[in-house]
Image (cartoon, coloured by chain):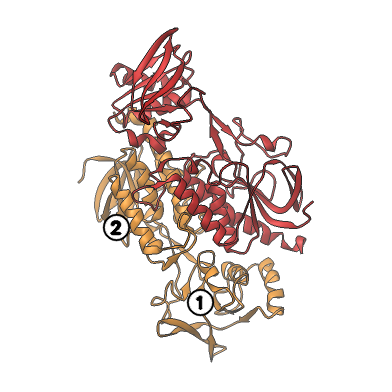
Chain colours: A red, B orange
Amino acid sequence: MDTEIKDVIMVGAGPSSLAAAIYTTRENIGTVLYEKGAVGGLAAITDMVDNYPGFPDGVEGLTLASQLEQQAKRFGAKIEFGDVSAIRDEGDVKVVTVDGSEVRAKTILIATGSDYNKVGVPGEAEYYGRGVHYCATCDGAFYRDKRLVVVGGGNSAVQEAIFLTRFASHIDLLVRSTIKASEILQHDLQPLVDAGKITVHLNSPITEIVAVEGKVTSVLATKDGEPLTIEIDGVFIFVGLKPNTQFLAGSGIELDEVGLVKTDHKLQTNIPGIFASGDVRSGATMQIASAVGEGASAALSIREYIDEHKHTHA
Amino acid sequence: MDTEIKDVIMVGAGPSSLAAAIYTTRENIGTVLYEKGAVGGLAAITDMVDNYPGFPDGVEGLTLASQLEQQAKRFGAKIEFGDVSAIRDEGDVKVVTVDGSEVRAKTILIATGSDYNKVGVPGEAEYYGRGVHYCATCDGAFYRDKRLVVVGGGNSAVQEAIFLTRFASHIDLLVRSTIKASEILQHDLQPLVDAGKITVHLNSPITEIVAVEGKVTSVLATKDGEPLTIEIDGVFIFVGLKPNTQFLAGSGIELDEVGLVKTDHKLQTNIPGIFASGDVRSGATMQIASAVGEGASAALSIREYIDEHKHTHA
């Protein structure tokens, strides 16, 4: 067992915790990040990030992720690979279980993000970020005057299909069974259907995303059991979000109804000394800029917490 | 009078509203920013920004400001120079008075920032950002093992002097009259005084900041009426913050006790359709990363508000 008590352990090494680590390490707050997947989180697997402020012509997701990592490491952040399976509050000390071993810290930042649920059809993983998208705010603007398929029948699918009509010339909405979205959203949808901007296909599960020479060209589905082919330029999939908070089961950390971590205005959870920022936080926007900004703010809260509790650790 | 109703008027063109404008304009939300000073706000007059995430080796403040401006303009943001003297809520329409004329919008983003109060001595303005600083979180790390003067006797001066001992080898705290900081902070200060890390000078108003060949080398003060010269590498001044919210007098927008704008978790003020982000917001961290992140989040709230109210405007 590692008996050293670290200043802060950050769970996850995506944009939010990397930003937080830039702040904490620059202020000599000892910082370790544990990541079980790719450093940079969803940013690292995004083709082009057009709206992260500071890069006028956009920046490749992988480049941005790498630059965030370099900047955090420059000031002394330690990034380690490991799977965090549990956290435990012991008052002034927090215990994190990583790959079966326990490590201790004065504070924890939960920044494990959320993943987009997948439909699991051929072509979906292959063309992620290059024709297949999960975030309309991020990637909708790449499809001005293009044809799109939107997959899903819940609130977010209908809301984002409506939003995407700002850009797309036409949208086919593929709904597996029936529309589950709220009446208000269905009411907003109707005029767009009447105007021919959106075509709704009920009982139409998607079966494949087809690309020619690396470019997504069509979507295959079955409509009432009959094959359906739709020629398009891109596909947006909205079938839910999975917050990476399974490891918090039994920790006492309060989650909201979809499993995101609740925080106060200081980004602190219901347990003092345990903070959360980025896409894992209730109210998250799923935007890199917001995640980064919250990381910076969380770092200042972490510093304040450590300063206020230093006498008990001395 | 301009009779057109714009989608959103942003008051101020600093990092927070430029970030918001990147988001709104990219989504075809018509956006006008009014700025009475320099585009880029405090960032534009900062020598080097070391902790804005995404730039591993830091970025010049002016470069960052210019890149934010280019990015917002790329998607269609209009930046106009003008002094906003009042805003008025007329329900679905908000009225902004700019240089005596009225312009109308569905929504407003208040992003006028805050200014650091100055002590008003020779050398202060000339060496701003190059030896004279107002933000310990931003610039403290540039002074590892250096000697500093901290000016002020209130809570933030004492708190930041304590914080700066993480970096500086020694700090002279110049207090105009007596220390006004809380008892807790004075209690935290004492061991650092005892250890010789901080020397407190009471009744010691600063009179001049002296530089040799462009480099700050000493601070002049009077101590109990006698001249005092302190050789140092940098000066941090903490004599209060002035939120740029005078134009909100009579608007009905709720401010906190220091004059910052109160917002909810969606960054909306107490008046629906009027939002605030960045350094002007109650709870602000005075960090560019946080201001930018809040700008992005505010943009999403603005879009949501416009979408929900479009029937009343149609």
Quarter of the rendering occupied by the C terminus of chain A: bottom right
Q: Give x and y (percent) for residue B145.
A: 59, 76
Horizontal arrangement in the rendering, residue A268 relative to residue A297 (left or right) = right
Q: Amino acid at mark 2?
A: Asp
Q: Give x and y (percent) for residue A264.
A: 60, 45
Q: Few, some or many C-alpha atoms within 10 Å of disc 2 (few <14, some 14-19, many ≥20)?
A: some
Q: For this rendering, which residue is in front, A224 or A196?
A: A224
Q: Give x and y (percent) for residue A110.
A: 63, 45
The chain that hosts pointer 2 is B
Q: Residue at x 60, y 61 (%)?
A: A76
Q: Few, some or many C-alpha atoms within 10 Å of disc 1 (few <14, some 14-19, many ≥20)?
A: many
Q: For this rendering, which residue is in front, A118 or A122?
A: A122
The chain that hosts pointer 1 is B
**Residue at far front of view:** A213
- Of helix, strand and loop, which one carries label 2? loop
On residue B257, the disc is none
Residue B75 sits in quarter: top left
Q: Give x and y (percent) for residue B20.
A: 39, 47
Question: What residue is shown with label 2?
Answer: B83
Asked if residue B202 shows in the view, the reply is yes
Q: Amino acid at mark 1?
A: Val
**Residue at far top of view:** A225
**Residue at far bottom of view:** B226
Horizontal arrangement in the rendering, residue A181 relative to residue B97 (left or right) = right
Q: Residue at x 56, y 58 (%)?
A: A73
- Of helix, strand and loop, which one carries label 1? strand
Is B29 rendered above or below residue B205? above
Is A40 rendered above or below residue B171? above
Is A106 rendered above or below residue A286? below
On residue B235, the disc is 1
Q: CA distance from mark 2 to mark 1?
A: 32 Å
Asked if residue B272 shows in the view, the reply is no
